[in-house]
Image (cartoon, rainbow, N blue to C red):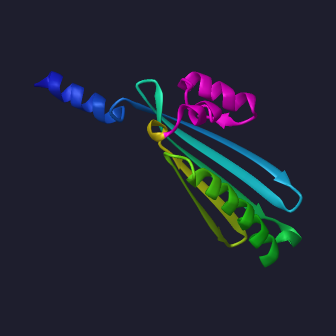
Amino acid sequence: MKKIIVIIMLIFLTGCGSTKLVCTGEESGTGYLLKEKYVYTFKKGEVSKATMTVTRSLLGSNKTAEALADHKAVADAAAKYYNDMDGVTASVNARNDKVTLTVNINPSKMKDVYKKQYELNLSIEDTRKSFEEKGYTCE
């Protein structure tokens, strides 16, 4: 009985064998701050799902309705591009001087060419290395 309880606890604590990798990055430009967050879930050594969140905050004199609309138009175009891919859903939210693009990815429904292009075919170690080489912080 104790063995069964221990096994159940291990499965519960490890999320049924899944591991998450979270990588974040930030950059500023003229009139905006861009924050990116990537959350990868790995099961059996492969990416089982991924979420990308990109938030552009308007700063200073760039906090105008026109600037917000311009940034939203760029995010809408990106969302349309992602939504045209199998296994990907994207949405845009624009309010309070911020535009957020959220992309949810199910690699099992994607074509291999896109998995390779977006590095969804890498191990957790190689994914971490790739992000860190690009200046992101991963945990």
What is the quadrant of the C terminus in the image?
top right
Asked if 63 appears above or below 38 in the picture, the reply is below
Residue 84 visible in image: yes
User: Residue at image x 56%, y 54%?
Assistant: 83
What is the quadrant of the N terminus in the image?
top left
Residue 64 visible in image: no
User: Residue at image x 60%, y 28%?
Assistant: 127
Task: Give residue 5's quadrant in the image.
Answer: top left
- Nearest the eye: 96 or 123: 123
Asked if 50 appears above or below 95 in the picture, the reply is above
Asked if 63 appears above or below 80 in the picture, the reply is below
Q: Is residue 101 left or right of residue 135?
A: left
Q: x, y (%) of residue 49?
A: 47, 40
Q: Is residue 72 left or right of residue 128?
A: right
Q: x, y (%) of residue 71?
A: 76, 64
User: Residue at image x 64%, y 53%?
Assistant: 81
Asked if 102 appears above or below 134 in the picture, the reply is below
Q: x, y (%) of residue 116?
A: 60, 30
Q: Is residue 130 magenta?
A: yes
Q: Check the image and name the residue furthest to the bottom.
A: 65
Task: Give residue 129's quadrant in the image.
Answer: top right
User: Residue at image x 57%, y 52%?
Assistant: 84
Marks counted in the figure total: 0
Q: Is residue 129 left or right of residue 124?
A: right
- Nearest the eye: 110 or 129: 110
Read off the magenta span: 110-139
